[in-house]
Every structure is written in structure tokens, then in C-alpha cells.
Image (tube, rainbow, N blue to C red):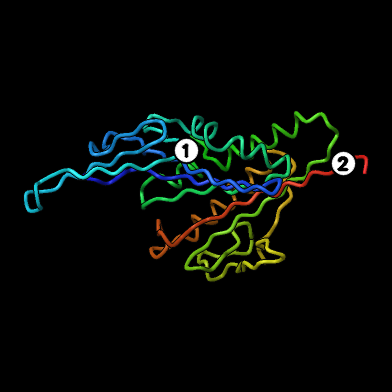
Amino acid sequence: GGGRVDGAALGAKAEGDGKETVRVVARVRAGKDVSANISWERNALKVSVPRTADTVNNHIEEYDFKFAHVFGPETTQTQMFQGAVRDLVRGALDGINCTIFAYGQTGSGKTYSICGNHSEPGFIQRSLACLFDAVDRREDGAKVTLSMSFIEVYKEVGYDLLTKEGGKTMDSWPIVSVSLVGGNPVLSGAKRVAISNEEEALHHYFLGDNNRTVAETPHNLNSSRSHCIFTIYVEVSDEVA
């Protein structure tokens, strides 16, 4: 209600061939309580802030925010993935590094977009399916090797979600540190798991997601200081070499 925008913004960064591109889209959260003070079109989101009689002239302030694309509340998970994520994921098989992340206030729909639920998978599950489908369709004879890692970051400390050694509190989990090696970020202490098919990949993902749920405490539950980083590593080599 009010001037609040119920939605999350999705940022995507791609690097390849010496070029770097950042694309930002917005998603208005679905629901019957979408604020009457917001409106949108294909590439812009407008927020109207009504002022009370206590302020000068009792006027309405309007703010326009430009995005690469604005997805309305009727947008499905499938449409979001196809419109904002799929091409980036496919580009990974051509050697293009990409990062996809969601940001917004608590309850704006970040986790739903990225992780989804059992009936409506999120970007992670759809990205895995997309990659394995693309690998199966390749006809160039290249060897493609996929692996993954999954970590939780809480209060600037990383924890490995794919470990089988963690207890019910994060304090007992292996700590992951982040460092720069040759200008590239390296996760030290994060388990990197080889995945050969979609079913195997989803098994490890759900293991990590379950570990995250088990370790939740009143301190980090739905906390804006708690984040997860899911990484898919793609290696492509010439089979003949």
C-alpha cells in the first residue's frame, strides 16, 4: 500500500569478448494488493507519492524509473526466465560469464524469482534444465563438464550448503572465504560438486536448500543480511584435443 513498490529488481551482468554488459529489469510482485500508486509500461516504472495537507500545496510527486524491461504482476515464472535469464544461461556454453541476482526489500519476491517453489520452479532449477538441454542438443562434438557450488552468506561470513557435515546451526558448518586470484573471485572452502544430468543437479540443489532451511534461526530467518550464492561452472573442451 501507500507508495511502496511490491517487487524485486533483477540485475544481470555478462562478460565475454572483452565486453561487459549490465541489464536491469523490474518485476512487480503478483497479488491483489498491488499499490494504486504505481504504474508501469514496457521499460519504465512510475511511482506516485501523494502528499498530505501538512505539506506545501498538497500535491502528488511522481518518479519515473527506467529499466531494460518491466514485468507486470501477471508474469509467470516461465515468462520471467525466458525474458530475462535464458539467453544469459545459454551464453555460458559459449564462454560468456554471467551473474544473475535479485535485489529489493524484504517480501518483494526475490527468493520466489530465484528459487521458486515445488509447483513453480525458480531461475536456479530452470537454468540447470536449460543448460543440460542445450548440452544434449550440441552437435559439435565438444566435451561439456558442469559442476556447482552453493553457499550461504550471513553477516559477511560464507557457509557451504552442500556439506554433509553441518549441524543445526551455521556455527558448525564449514566456512567459505572469498579472495581474488588474478582478478577473479575464488571461493575457498566451498564444495564443488560435479553434475552429469539435471536430476543429479537438482538433488544437490535441494540438499543445499534443505540445509539452509534446517540451519535457519530467528536471527537469520528472512534477514536482509542473509544471502545465498548458487554457482554453475561450465567447462567446454574439444573432444579431439
Residue reaching furthest to the right:
240
Query: Foreground: 208 or 86?
Result: 86
What is the C-alpha distance between the residues marked 2 and 1? 36 Å
Residue appearing at x 23%, y 41% in the figure: 48
Q: Residue 47 in the image: x percent, y percent?
A: 28, 42
The residue type indicated by label 1 comes to Ala
Sort mark 2 into few (<14), some (14-19) or many (20+) by Cα contacts within 10 Å: few
**Of 132 and 201, the residue lying toward us:** 132
User: Mark 2 or mark 1, which has the lower sequence index?
Assistant: 1
- Mark 1 surroundings within 10 Å by alpha-carbon count, few (fewer than 14), some (14 through 19), many (20 or more): few
Amino acid at the residue labelled 2: Asp
Image coordinates for residue 9, horizontal then vertical, percent: 43, 45
Residue most toward the left? 53
Q: Secondary structure at mark 1?
A: loop
Numbered circle sitting on residue 189: none
Q: How many marks?
A: 2
On the image, the x and y values in percent for residue 98 come to 62, 47
Residue 139 placement, left or right of 49: right
Residues marked 2 and 1 touching at CB (< 8 Å) = no
- Nearer to us: label 2 or label 1: 1
Q: Which residue is mark 2?
A: 238
Q: Which mark is residue 68?
A: 1
At x 36%, y 43%, the residue is 65
Q: Is residue 234 left or right of residue 33?
A: right
Against 177, is 132 above or below? above
- Frontmost residue, 90 versus 15: 15
Residue situated in front as seen by the camera: 223 or 46: 46
Q: Quadrant of residue 144?
A: top right
Q: Quadrant of residue 218?
A: bottom left
Q: Residue at x 62, y 68 (%)?
A: 177
